[in-house]
Image (cartoon, rainbow, N blue to C red):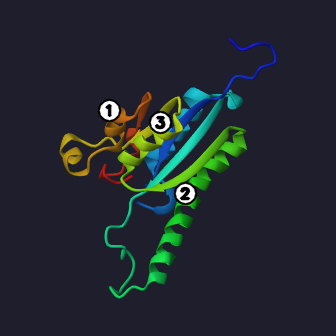
Amino acid sequence: MAGAGVVPEPTRIMVGVNESTIKGYPHASISSKGAFEWTLKKIVRSNFSGFKLLFLHVQVSDEDGFDDMDSVYASPDDFKKMNRRDMIRGVHLLEYFVNRCHELGVSCEAWLKKGDPKEVICHEVNRVQPDFLVVGSRGLGPFQKVFVGTVSEFCAKHADCPVITIKRKADEAPQDPVDD
């Protein structure tokens, strides 16, 4: 029990966020925004000082590195430019969430990683040790899950903390649920 005048540590909530597959960078996905807004509305509420949000965006590495190049003859500088561009895009995505937190007075941190989102999120949960993890879910059907897989299901099974999965609202779902 905290003594008089001792401020308890804020509850640390990690929120996995990603870019929109429809609009691309710097727009957040429908699921990410939904998970963030749900966290603010249902958990943080007006207790802004009682929580610290930890935003993690995992960028999936482009397998061949030539996603928007028209030549296969790339120089080392081309790869440096692509890496810089990707980092800038990721920072702009995180900026949305960080700015919203600052508007409300909610403490937060945000960072980027590269790799397989489900593996990286679980690794970062182990490293950072949040009180719990919030991730959005696209609401894929069983057929789509086989081909696409779900980050939220993997995290629910493998993350070393409680995981809250927030489904998209039906009226926010695009025609193809793989889109987000």
| Place of residue 125 in the rendered image (x, y in percent of width and height, measured from the top left) | 47, 38
Tag nearer the camera, 2 or 1: 1
Q: Secondary structure at mark 3?
A: strand
- Along the polypeptide, which appears first: circle 1 or circle 3? 3
Residue 137, quarter of picture: top left
Task: List the residue tagged with mark 1.
Answer: 157
Could you give the CA–CA distance between mark 2 and mark 1, rounded to whole angstroms? 27 Å
Give the residue furthest to the right: 5
Residue 92, image x and y in percent? 58, 60
Secondary structure state at the residue bearing disc 2: helix
| Residue at image location 35% in from the left, 54% down from the top | 179
Q: Secondary structure at mark 1?
A: helix
Q: Are marks 3 and 2 in contact (CB under 8 Å)?
A: no
Query: Seen in the image, is 70 located left or right of residue 36?
Result: left
Q: Are marks 2 and 1 in contact (CB under 8 Å)?
A: no
Q: Is residue 88 above or below residue 160?
A: below
Give neighbour class at mark 3: few <14, some 14-19, many 20+ (Cα, 10 Å).
Answer: many
Badge 1 density bin: few <14, some 14–19, many ≥20, Cα 10 Å: few
Q: Which residue is mark 3?
A: 134
In the rendered image, which quarter contains the N terminus?
Answer: top right
Q: Amino acid at mark 1?
A: Lys
Crowd rating for badge 2 (residues with CA inside 10 Å; few <14, some 14–19, many 20+): many
- State the image coordinates of residue 127 (x, y, percent, origin top left): 49, 40
Residue at 36%, 77% (x, y): give it.
66
Task: Name the side, left or right, on which 154 lies relative to 147.
Answer: right
3D distance between C-alphas at marks 1 and 3: 13 Å
Estimate the spatial distance between the alpha carbons at disc 3 and disc 2, rounded to whole Å.
17 Å
The structure residue drawn at horizontal position 32% and vertical position 85%, both measured from the top left corner, is 72
Give residue 32's position: percent from left, percent from top.
47, 46
Residue that badge 2 annotates:
93
